[in-house]
């Protein structure tokens, strides 16, 4: 998977795609799974750290998405396709954590809303090149790498990332802010 996703497929409107899927065409259904399976698996693997469990969660998420589609009017879904479909893998990860991980850890002690992360011009740092970003990513802690990828490659919200990582939203924001700061510092050093 490339370091930065192509937004062509993932930002398309959900209504048209889901309307076609609801017709039951197997080829379109297979294309839909093919398009999203890598992202689903990556999220599930980050949540579990186990390839077999990640595979099971991926399959469960697709089953849940297709089951929900039977009872959904695609015309009423007014959002990009990825935002609709990503909820199914996030829910599968949250269910996994509720069964096997226990309660959420306490929130981080820092207040991410006051740490300046909202003022960072992240997109301009990407212009510096993916090779340098990859090198800088390798210097991050495992948690920071995961939240960075979940946010910037897999395009999940903070709440979704919290469900996947089984952490409070504030902890996710804190890890992501620290990851961004380290990457910006690393990119600045060349």
Image: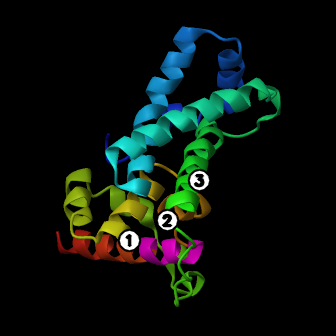
Image spot of residue 176 (x, y percent): 44, 71
Mark 3 vs mark 1: give the one in front.
Answer: 3
Of residue 122 and residue 107, the one placed in the foreground of this image is: 107
Which image quadrant is residue 70 in?
top right
Q: Secondary structure at mark 1?
A: helix
State the separation of the CA atoms marked 3 and 2: 10 Å
Which of the image's four quarters has the N terminus?
top left
Q: Which residues are magenta?
A: 168-176
Label drawn at residue 180: 1
**Is residue 174 part of the magenta span, yes or no?**
yes
- Work out whether mark 3 precedes mark 2 in sequence or the reverse, and give the earlier one: 3
Q: Position of residue 41 (x, y in %)?
A: 41, 41
Q: Is residue 5 visible?
A: no
Residue nearer the viewer, 166 or 21: 166
Taking depth in this image into account, of 120 and 107 the one nearest to the observer is: 107
Residue that badge 3 annotates: 95
Q: Residue at x 42, y 63 (%)?
A: 147
- The main secondary structure of the magenta stretch is helix
79 is higher (above) or lower (below) than 9: below
Between 168 and 147, the one lying in front of the other is 168
SS assignment at label 2: loop
In the image, which disc is placed on residue 101?
2
C-alpha gap between disc 3 and disc 1: 29 Å
Q: Residue at x 34, y 57 (%)?
A: 126
Residue 176 in sight in this render: yes
Q: Earlier in the sequence, mark 3 or mark 1?
A: 3
**Which mark, by number, is residue 71?**
none
Looking at the image, residue 109 sits to the left or right of residue 79; the answer is: left
Identity of the residue furthest to the front in this view = 99
| Quarter of the figure with residue 156 | bottom right
């Amino acid at each position: 998977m490339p370091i930065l996703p192509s937004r062509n497929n993932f930002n398309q409107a959900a209504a048209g795609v889901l309307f076609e899927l609801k017709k039951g065409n197997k080829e379109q259904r297979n294309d839909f799974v093919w398009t999203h399976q890598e992202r689903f698996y990556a999220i599930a693997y980050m949540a579990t750290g186990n390839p077999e469990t990640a595979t099971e969660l991926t399959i469960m998420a697709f089953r849940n998405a297709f089951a929900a589609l039977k009872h959904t009017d695609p015309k009423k879904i007014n959002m990009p396709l990825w935002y609709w479909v990503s909820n199914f893998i996030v829910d599968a990860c949250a269910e996994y954590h509720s069964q096997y991980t226990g309660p959420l850890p306490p929130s981080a002690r820092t207040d991410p809303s006051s740490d300046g992360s909202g003022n960072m011009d992240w997109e301009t740092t990407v212009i510096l090149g993916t090779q340098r970003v990859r090198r800088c990513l390798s210097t991050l802690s495992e948690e920071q790498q995961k939240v960075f990828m979940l946010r910037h490659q897999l395009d999940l919200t903070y709440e979704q990332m919290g469900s996947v990582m089984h952490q409070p939203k504030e902890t996710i924001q804190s890890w992501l802010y620290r990851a961004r700061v380290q990457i910006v510092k690393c990119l600045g050093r060349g």
